[in-house]
Image (cartoon, helix red, strand yellow):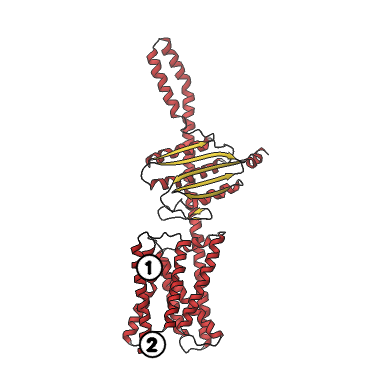
Amino acid sequence: MNFDITCVSMTVLYEIVYMFALLFFFKKVFGAEFSKNFKRYFIGLGIYVCIVGINYVRLCTINSQGKHTYLSVLSLLINLLLLFKASVLLYFIFKKRNITVGFSLFYTVVVYLMSDTVSFIFCETISMVRKELIVILCGTIMQVLLIIILRIYDKKRESKRLPLCLMSLSNKEYILLSAILLFVYIMEREILNSSVLPIVKMTMIFFVFIVVFLTTLIFTIKEKNMSVGNRLIVLEEQMKATAGYCNELGNKDEDLRKFRHDIINTLCKLDGILSDTKIEVARDYISDIIEDVKATRMQYNTGCFVADVVLTSKQKIIKEINAKLSVYGIIPEDAVKDSDMVDILSNLLDNAIIACGKIEGEKEIVIDSYLENEKWVFKISYPTSEKQITINDQVLITEDNKYINGTGLLNIKKIVEKYSGNVILLSLDDFLHVKMTFDYYKIKGRKDD
């Protein structure tokens, strides 16, 4: 077995770029967190180096002894192992991620497929014999360009659709898609390395590009379907919540009607008790009346009746999770429509309740409402145990809370924009702050007109 310094150098460079690209994807695009157990780093890296080293020995053995039956079987096993080398390393480097295996396998197969395709086109263009080193070089250059593009894309931060597209597929779907692309890759290698007519090879290349295009189309369609599905779920939840608030308003109104109806009889009865000079009985009766009055009164007095109803309706579940709801300031009653106020407050409080429910001990949800530079500022702050990944002010949906957490904030953003406002999300000191700013005087002027 001969030691080829050029082959080793190119392979090492390729592996470094390959892993750097995957690390960039998981850290920057998916927002994965590194494991704090550094022993796992060395274990994962050791396994990774062993797999790469075994593959290099396999290639040198085949070059020196030629292909034998036992080597073919061994090569197949090693090639399968190579496909999962990144998955093993990423498993030890990052905290557990649901799509670690699927996406790393998908990325590996795509790199193999495109490296083979581009190297063939390059060699055919300059009439050069295609060798494995050319394939490795093309794969390295392609991944360097990909890292540069992603870096520029990450700095611009204008559109964050890429993470949503990549996270729209589950781990099983990534593995299934990788198996299909792997079949295309094996078929392409067999055709390109055979002595078939050039037109057949070019047809295969054309077929590969069609497969790549269809793959990108799958991501786009899946992301749109997921987005539409989530919005429908949120709308359904909001309709149920709105119906509940309307029922509660109806019940409160009915209680007030009964109270007004009974007040005359109550006063007449009290007048009769006082006429008989039964002072103690009168005091007890007055105490009962006071309790009845308190029962019909809202727990909050923000200046906006609809907001008071929503806040009161959420008070019970907030107490159940050992949390406290504090409201500071006045909420303008004429700032937004009643239905929009219900959607904004219910979505914000649902998110806060879910986040606080995952934290032990006492928690506080704080709502601030105030005027600042002719703007109405409405802000909610609550503790969270999870690192928030925001994309276009939208928190990515998780398996634990796939119904409300992400699309609810997106819905709030659309409502706020109707009133010439904007939404800012900040994650500071394990607290998530959602700040909405409305052009209050512009809204007020529009209503006055």
Name the kind of residue labelled 1 in the image. Answer: Leu
Q: Residue furthest top?
A: 276
Residue hosting label 1: 89
In this rendering, the answer to whether 273 lies above or below 372 is above
The answer to which quarter of the image holds residue 66 is: bottom left
What residue is at 40 percent from the left and 17 percent from the top? Answer: 283
| Residue 224 x %, y % | 51, 60
Residue hosting label 2: 63
Query: How dense is the environment of label 1, judged by Cα within 10 Å: few (below 14), some, or many (20 and up)?
Result: many
The answer to which quarter of the image holds residue 172 is: bottom left
Label 2, label 1: how far apart the Cα atoms are? 29 Å
Query: Is residue 30 found left or right of 333 in the rendered image?
Result: left
Q: Nearer the viewer, residue 141 or 77?
A: 141
Observer able to see residue 248: yes
Q: Nearer the viewer, residue 109 or 430?
A: 430
| Residue 296 x %, y % | 46, 29
**Secondary structure under the numbered disc 2 in the rendered image:** helix
In this rendering, the answer to whether 182 lies above or below 98 is below
In this rendering, the answer to whether 247 lies above or below 164 is above
The answer to which quarter of the image holds residue 376 is: top right
**Secondary structure under the numbered disc 1 in the rendered image:** helix
What residue is at 55 percent from the left and 45 percent from the top? Answer: 436
The quadrant of the picture occupied by the C terminus is top right
Observer able to see residue 66: no
Name the kind of residue labelled 2 in the image. Answer: Asn
Q: Nearer the viewer, residue 251 or 104?
A: 104
| Residue 338 x %, y % | 55, 40
